[in-house]
Image: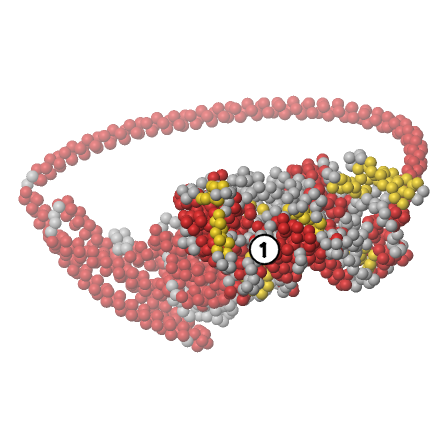
Amino acid sequence: MAGTHVLDLYVKGTRAWFPDDEKGWVRASLTSRTSQGPKAILQFETEDSETMTVEATYEDVDSKKVSLPPLCNPPILEGIDDLTHLSHLHEPAVLHNIRTRYAQHNIYTYSGIVLIAVNPFQRVSLYSQDIIEAYSGKSRGELEPHLFAIAEDAFQGMLREGRDQTIIVSGESGAGKTVSAKYIMRYLASVHQTPAITKPKGSSSQPELSKVEEQILATNPILESFGNAKTTRNDNSSRFGKYIEIKFSHEFKIVGARIRTYLLERSRLIYQPPTERNYHIFYQLCEAASPAERAELGITNYADFHYLNQGGEGVISGVDDTEEFEATINALTTVGIDANQQKAIFRLLAGLLHLGNVEFGGTDRSGAYVNEQDPAYQKAVQLLQLDSAQFQKWLIKKQIVTRTEKIVSSLNRQQSMLVRDSVAKFIYAHLFDWLVAAINQSLCTPEMLTEARCFIGVLDIYGFEHFEKNSFEQFCINYANEKLQQEFNKHVFKLEQEEYAREQIANWTFIDYSDNQPCIDLIEGKLGVLALLDEESRLPNGSDSSLINKLYKQLSLPDRPSAKTTGPPPVFTKPRFSNSAFTVHHYAHGVTYESEGFLEKNKDTVPEELSDVLRASKFSFLCDVLNHQSRSEDTSADARRVSPTSPTPTLGSVFKASLINLMDTIGSTESHYIRCIKPNESKVAWAFDPQMVLSQLRACGVLETIRISCSGYPSRRMIPEFDERYYILAKDSTRTADPRDLAQQILAATMPESDKYQIGLTKVFFRAGQLAFLEKLRTERLNHCATLIQKNARRMIQRKKYLRTRAALIQLQAMVRRRIAQQQVTALRRNRAALQIQTWWRAQHHRRLYVNRRKSCITIQRYSRGYLTRQWFQDLRTRTAAVTMQKYCRAFLARRVYQRELQLVVMMQSCIRRRTARKELKTLRIEARSINRIKEASMNLENKVMELTRQLATEKEEHRLLKKKYADMENRSTSYYDKWRGLEAQMATIIAQKEQTLAERTKELGKIKEDYEALTQQLEKLAEEFQLKEDEIEEVRGKLAKAQVSSTEHKNSQTMILNLQEEIANLKLQLASVSNQHLHHPSGVSNTSDNTLFSNQRDRKMSQPDFASGPRSAANNRASGQKWKRATIGATQGSDLANMLKLQFDANGGMDESDTYSTMNGSAEYPFLGPEEIERILDSDELINEILDELIHTLVVPIPNFQYEFPALELVYPAHLIGFCAIQMFKYNMSSRIQKLMMSVIATIQKQTVSFDSDFDCAFWLSNVFELLSIIKTTMSEHDTNMYEFVESERAMGESMQYLESLLSDIYFGWVKELQKRFIKLIIPGVVESEALPGFRSNDSNFLSKIIGPKESSVKIEHVLNFFNNVWKIMQFYCVDPAIMKQIISELLSTIGVTAFNHIIMRKNFCSWKRGMQIQYNLTRLEEWCKAHDVSDSTRHSEMLLQAVKLLQLQKSTLADINVMFDVCDLLNPAQIKKLLSIYSISDYENPISQDILAEIARRSASSERIDSLLLDSNDLNEQVLYLTARKVPLIEKYIPPKLNLARVRSLVQSHPGVIHAAIMPAGAPVQHI
């Protein structure tokens, strides 16, 4: 494209930039363009209504005699996150883009490989743990610009290539270098840790760090306290440079670190300019020292010390020195500096403060002196433990050593003060080096070095400095920046060259750029500034004036290239109005340095005599600090030990050597650059000073890099993206399907000159400004198409209007004609209707008269009949009432007469009886007075007792005989039982001879029954006799109690009675045992195979407690049973014993032959166990082992078959069987067995589900554990908790419930985590990237799409729905509780909300209204699925995601729309709304969001920005609690699969009454319940 094309770009409405002294650049619009011959006159109007005029001809533009104002970028590119994507890449465009993003509170911007960071001077919520996790594993450019993206890029580069990495953070003081470096270190230490100590992802809390990582982060507060200070530009300015190597192992885990420091500002210790402070540690010590430390160290207020009060300000706003001091103490402890060493450090610092307060007296003629009584001097000597005399001597004396003698001379007061200050600087510098060495010793042990493979270095270096007065420190700093800039330029152009070669661009030559090597040679050359400075420093009489003269003489010679009038500009010049300064022209701009103090600062030494005094101190820590070769770990040590015979190296030579070594290190690593920018001098939050930012952009080399890049092909687009945007510029007939050919056709049609572009393999490269020209052509083409569409639209509208008018007229005529005809028809209809109305009216009138007359007659008859009937009924009621009253009156009178007579008879009888009783009483009183009567009664009683004693002896003999007879019967019963066992062993033979065996067994049972009945009758007789004897004993007892006679015979009688009662009770129990043995051991086989064992068992009522009544009734029955066995037989129990046994036997149906044998499919039935055998089985470990092996260990979980519906009992039978056994143990009060069973079951299930590798296993055991928990809770809720003997069992069951709840929670959360791990891979492509709506496809402009081109997502929303369907069907198949099913789906929905929201808010390509439409459609699909499955889709996270999507679709054109945004998106905080709008990507035909709207959003979010979080907290399941209500289980299934070897469990189940066992039933038989 020729120069004329450039001028043709300036048409009316074009916007351009003009320089401004205050704002840097201002924007103006072209209002008119006139031509005067070949000259074009362009008139621009700025936003302040100021007119700018530019006159140019085509020839002037081509020859570059006239420079046109830089063009503005289109609105779509305003606020773009990468400066290299700008159509017009120049200084005003860069400044405006950074200012726009800064106004949107976006402080980070890419500029190619460089990240530009603008200091907000306010805490922003961009560094939380959620943000760290969001950038973890993401490629650079995939998310918004951030220093975490640079750190992750470095880490990924180390992973891919195994090469060391360096992150260079530069900028001027106050730009935020230290904070940026600190966050980079925190990122590397937080996000890439060992899995053993890493918390699960999504955690909003800080992860637990290893010891090494904590030590690395602890270096920041230490180095900040001892190396940072408050300056006019920065409250926390680093006064040294540092390079931290974070070392990684072969597994790329952090194993150690190493720190190098550069050029500590020693002069700050002795002098601070106004409003500035000394190093932080001194103020922290003065503020936070304890009273004991203050007394010991002599610490007072900072204003009392000369080294601290020179700046006038000792407090930093918003900083608490006490808290900072505590953080420093903790950090020192973390890196291994113990309390004693910390105490020694603070003592040394206090000594330096007191040394600064030492005053000198004397004059220049007499020399200086020190007052030994000076408190400051005494305290300093005491703390440092120096030789007072020697220290005092060499503070005011100096020694000159010649060949023959040593000359000692006095120093004046000013010289002595310089010596004092040099001692303080010397000690503090060595202390700082000792601290760095101690940190390195802790962070980088030999074991760590052997384990380390590679490292990531973080360089926090000072930026380019240019003050009103620049000294040696600024010279060294700018020298370092020159070296870094040279390395940066080489790196940038190397990448550019590799890009061109990779894309195979033809016919290109690399354009030379102005290298800063001459400036570097000027500084570090053989006759450079540093060489001359070192030479002058070694001369005894060297001075600053002789140095400056030597610089003028050597560096300004006419034959030097820098002095020539042609060629490159000079890099060294002499200021016009100064003879003590020199100017060096750096890459940014020229800086004038004052030579005063250069020699003194370069020497960096103290007198040898004072050095010896310090090293001879009795303070061991001071000696260690001075003698410690701290710099041996740094490259500066190499400079200090160049050769054994070389003189002491100067500070300049040391810094030069260390800088060369640093450049070698950076050159061997892959570099990443962060340029920090200070937006304003006053440190006001979110204030932007354009001139200050421009100077820093020039100083850090960003603008220079952009300028050089513009010489090549600075603009580039991916070929598919280029075709999609500019295909309308090619002719339709020539368009091809191949993207590269289509791009060639587009460029051939729009750019005839091929040197303005290049087509690579995947990208199209453009010269500067050519992309804007294509945008102009595209806009014109779109405008032309819009005009054509408008023309045809207007024609169509007018034609439709004509057709509508014509159709309306025709329709109106038809309506008029129809109206006339309707009127005629209406008249005819009215005449006919009148006749009909008259006819019907007459008929109706006569009929109404007839009906009224008929109705009146009927009414009169009805009322007459009713009146007569009521009269009759009233008479009837009156007669009936009279009869009733007469009846009750006669009854009352007769009753009253009878009661009176009865009362008189009773009274008469009472009087007669009273009279008779009085006579008898009188007779008894007379008899009672006779003593002979008493003796006679006593003798009768004694005779009675003796008679009873003889009767008892007789009864005892009878009991002995009865006991013997009972033993004989027991033997017979045992023999019968043995015979039954033998018959059972020969069951196969018995089945073959069924009829014969049945007859024999029937006879035997008959005999047993007869014996039993005989025994029962004898027992009844015995009980009756015993009852009679017991009545007689009770009568004797009563008489003995009345007579109050106590004799030996009575005691013996009572003892015998008790013994007799005990024997009877024992006999009763033995008989009951024999009966139970016969009842509980049936034998034989039924004669029909269809009958089941004990066919009438369902109707029996045994003494054993029934399980169906619940554990409460079972416990009560068991307790009552034990009491019945152990109690003695009382007066009422003995007579009922036989009846009770008989009732029990009869209730069981007797021993009928129908109950004797039973078969089921030809297999034998398990024996019916008695209470003792049940208790023995429950108490055995074999039962627990059987349950663990068959129901858990070897259990095969059924695979879901959605075509066949499994019954629930086939899926939850493990829970029911385990619960049944636990309840049986509880019934028998076996607390220890309950605990062992449940703990073993829980531990085994936990082992089965610990891996969570199978959804089937997880769902199966989740369902069974919940079922088992419900069974236990149901049991305990129905149990009577007031029974004391069940306390331990209740406790065991309670603990089991707690452990079951914990197991349920572990299975639930473990499975949910596993589901989330798989599901999270589907969320972004399936919910966010899936574009199911046609016509709303968005164009992604993210980094990956530029690299690999646009690619449609292979994962659709259908895949997400299929995942939900599969999980739901699995849970449904395994009978998972509906509440758990819904909660799991809610967890997955919450994961969608968190993941999708966090990606949308961090990725610009997702923030467009088209993408919002697609996401909302996908969310609607999810909502429909939830409604179909009765699941609530309303979680907070999903609601926030939906509001974020709505925000993308809302109108954003006026300030009034802001209120709508905040009302609709009430769940989003202002910071999130601001972030979404700041990265909003506009689509075609959409206007950009105005700066006024963004500024208002930023204003609303400013108040809460510090506390608002951008990202949603990830759903950390470790901190959640599962809240579920166990369901009530009314029935316990006793289904046992036939294949399972559960002999003991089957016996327990079958021995329980009231159940038909499903395990041994034929297929298809109904399942019975407990």
Question: Is disc 1 placed on a helix, strand or loop?
Answer: loop
Provide residue 1131's location: percent of width, then percent of height.
Answer: 25, 52
**689 to 563, vertically: above or below:** above
Is residue 179 shown left or right of residue 1040? right
Is residue 342 shown left or right of residue 65? left
Provide residue 70's location: percent of width, then percent of height.
Answer: 80, 45
Q: Is residue 1424 visible?
A: no
Provide residue 728's location: percent of width, then percent of height.
Answer: 86, 52
Front-most of 1384 and 1054? 1384
Kindly identify the residue that appears in the image at 23 percent across and 54 percent down. Answer: 1027
Amino acid at pointer 1: Leu
The quarter of the picture where residue 140 lies is bottom right
The quarter of the picture where residue 1491 lies is top right
Is residue 998 shown left or right of residue 1134? right
Is residue 603 shown left or right of residue 580? left
Kindly identify the residue that appears in the image at 66 percent across and 50 percent down. Answer: 549
Q: Is residue 632 visible?
A: yes
Front-most of 201 and 713? 713
Q: Residues within 10 Å of mark 1 (few under 14, many from 20)?
A: few
* Residue named by callout 1: 539
Kindly identify the residue that appears in the image at 37 percent across and 28 percent down. Answer: 891
Count the marks.
Answer: 1
Q: How is the image coloured?
A: secondary structure
Front-most of 266 and 301? 266
Front-most of 297 and 987? 297
Provide residue 923's location: percent of width, then percent of height.
Answer: 10, 37
Kindly identify the residue that appears in the image at 11 percent across and 35 percent down. Answer: 922
